[in-house]
Amino acid sequence: MAGFLDRAREQAQSALNQGKQKVDELQQQRAGNDLLKQLGAAYYAERRGSGAAEATQQALTALEAHIAAHGDGFLHGS
């Protein structure tokens, strides 16, 4: 009986870890999408004359830092 409970506990822990990993991936994807959206808005504002090149560069730098830390999977869709 103890072997069964140990296996059940291991399976539950594995499922919990997979769930946490999926949540982390979704949060990273959402953050990447937000950064990409900010870059687009900054670039658009710059091109229209109401934004600064510095804002576009800051948004690009933030996006590149996110990609370096978490990868570019959010750019490819899911």
Image (tube, grey):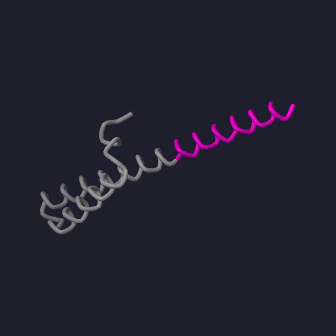
Q: Position of residue 21 (x, y in %)?
A: 53, 44
Left or right of 43 on screen, residue 69: right
Q: Where is residue 41 in the image (x, y as percent from the top left)?
A: 25, 56
Residue at 29 percent across and 61 percent down: it is 62
Placement of 29 over or under 56, stated as above or below? above
User: In the orientation shown, which residue stands out farthest toward the front?
Assistant: 3
Task: Name the one closer to the observer, 65 or 75.
Answer: 65
Placement of 64 over or under 76, stated as above or below? below
Q: Quadrant of the C terminus?
A: top left
Q: In which quarter of the image is the N terminus?
A: top right
Residue at 67 percent across and 41 percent down: it is 13
Residue at 36 percent across and 53 percent down: it is 34
Task: Name the one closer to the observer, 49 or 43.
Answer: 43
State which region is magenta.
1-23
The answer to whether residue 14 is magenta is yes
Q: Quadrant of residue 55?
A: bottom left
The answer to whether residue 5 is magenta is yes
Residue at 59 percent across and 41 percent down: it is 19
Left or right of 29 on screen, residue 16: right
Q: Position of residue 56 (x, y in %)?
A: 20, 62
Q: Where is residue 75 in the image (x, y as percent from the top left)?
A: 30, 41
Placement of 36 over or under 10, stated as above or below? below
Q: How many labels does the image show?
A: 0
Task: Name the one closer to the observer, 25 or 6.
Answer: 6
Task: Name the one closer to the observer, 60 or 42.
Answer: 60
Dominant SS in magenta: helix
